Image (spheres, rainbow, N blue to C red):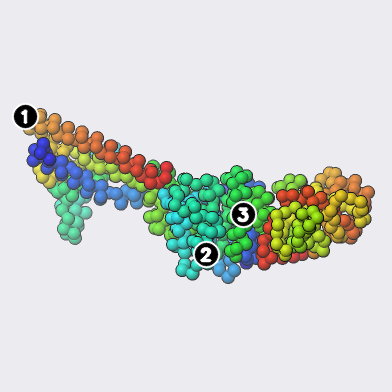
Amino acid sequence: MMWLSPSEGEALHLSLSVAARSVALSLPAAILLAWVLTRRRFVGHTLLDAFVHLPLVLPPVVVGYLLLVLFGARGPIGSWLERALGVELIFTRNGAALATAVMSFPLMVRAMRLSLENVDRGLEEAARTLGAGAIDRFATITLPLMLPGVLAGAITAFSAALGEFGAVITFVSNIPGETRTLPLALYTALQTPGGDTAAARLAFISFVLGLSGLLLSEWFARRVRRMLGR
Amino acid sequence: MLSVTVKKRRGSFSLDAHFELPTPGVVALFGRSGCGKSTLVNAIAGLLDADSGRVALDDIVLLDTEQRLYVPPEHRRIGYVFQDARLFPHMSVAANLKYGERRAPSQRFVSLDTVAALLDLGPLMGRRTHQLSGGERQRVAIGRALLSQPRLLLLDEPLAALDAARRDEVLPYLESLRDQLAIPMVYVSHDFDEVLRLATHVVLMESGKTIAQGGVGEMSLNRGLRSIIGADAVGAIVDGTVLGMDPASGLMRVKLGHGELKVEAANFAVGAKLRVQLLARDLIVATQAPQHLSVRNILTGVITTVASDDTDSDLVAIDIGGTAIMARVTKAATRALALQPGLPAWALVKAVSLRGHSFAAPPATSIARRGA
């Protein structure tokens, strides 16, 4: 990438890396939660639903702060992770991925739920009479049929992760080469005297990245629809 | 023997059903739409939780609420053909067919080749499910259910969503299924023609209750049937034996009871079982041996019952030697001929009126118990 400066390349690469980690981290949990929220009725359903949607309405700074409290070096989960697994979140790109995952989680779950609601439960019943147990049914019928939603959710979440700012800067700060993703780099450029050109270039990169994401997702959706015979 | 007892309450609807089917055989659950047939079938499959009940197939108990025994649908080994086929849209026809087969126990009674031949599925194999016609979809659904090696096959109005032509296309496949695989079937229908073509037994249902059950012949005389199928469709269904072709008329000679009937039908082999529907409205009753008539079909017997059918007609049942037939006559005729039980009678039926009312009967092994 000749036309990008080293710091721009680094920010772009870091953004993609953080977004990919974020999607990988949240995808299984989002599928599980979408299924639970769509197919199960239980006490606390509404509360769980609200909790999942919380990052949509909370200021990102609050989410970042809560992550610091829970996952920080002295936080109950953060200290355990470091002791038991040697995973450090604070000031790292894994931490940035966690912050973006939490922020984009509701978008992902929403897309999957929409798709799952359209899966004909009669087909699952048919699979059941053909001898398929619960996990088997989910893997061979439900999941393939909700795939459009899973893909849409993953792509939306990936795009949102590329642009997450508030939660990231609050939780893992703004460290070049580790947590300074595109939006953070853009913010830094704006804070630097004479950084206008750099800011414009970063904004343009974000623009191209977003557009490609949308086009790619449309192309994917068409392929999946054809595969499902629609 | 399939034995089913199911009770279920849901809102204002309550299901209270009990029936038994000697196996192998085809029992038709027959009744108006909304009488609980599908609910009952879902309970047999295990897709619906019964409040109480027992479902057993031979010595295998699938549900017994008293013993707190519930075998989940995926372990019942009951094939289910739904009204809307429910083929998996993301799989090819072949993958749909193999879905159940892959999950079936290792001892198989029917192979993919057999099923493909029986249902003529070869040409459909490579297609996607959305490229199939309604009739083809149902054939694939039936094949898929069979390949899961079921102990029992449930068919919930498999032809209801099809037009008349498609229905006639699928029915012969169902007949060959019945005759060539000794698998017990529960067939839900609100179309009496399908029952006539396929069933060995009939269970009549009305507002969630099983009101009568028995062999097809016996049930064709049941009074509960009239309100569902209408007065004009009432008539005895009799399984006879083909004696051969009558060279003069080109009609098939069929032994019914101790009499004989000439029927317009396809060429059946001598000794084959032929099912004939004798509509009550088409039968003429005489109390003396009739002479000088164009009618070729005269069955002799003894009147067993004379029952009022509506304000001005009676239904007269005549035993023609182990089987009964039924004629509708006016009340005036009942009085004029002094029709009453015990009286010898001659039943006249025009060969022409039997056109389209004779079919291959189920094999003898699965025919109803007699004289019940």
Q: Are marks 1 and 2 in contact (CB under 8 Å)?
A: no
Q: Earlier in the sequence, mark 2 or mark 3?
A: 2
Say left or right for B130 vs A37: right
Q: Are marks 2 and 3 in contact (CB under 8 Å)?
A: no
Q: Secondary structure at mark 1?
A: loop
Q: Position of residue A89 (x, y in %)?
A: 17, 51
Label 2 packing within 10 angstroms: few (<14), some (14-19), many (20+): some
The residue where tag 2 is placed is B110
Say left or right for B130 vs A73: right
Q: Position of residue B289 (x, y in %)?
A: 91, 56
Q: Residue at x 91, y 54 (%)?
A: B290
Marks 1 & 2 on one chain:
no
Q: Position of residue B75 (x, y in %)?
A: 48, 63
The residue where tag 3 is placed is B172
Q: Residue at x 77, y 55 (%)?
A: B251
Q: Which mark is residue A56?
A: none
Say which amino acid is labelled 2.
Val
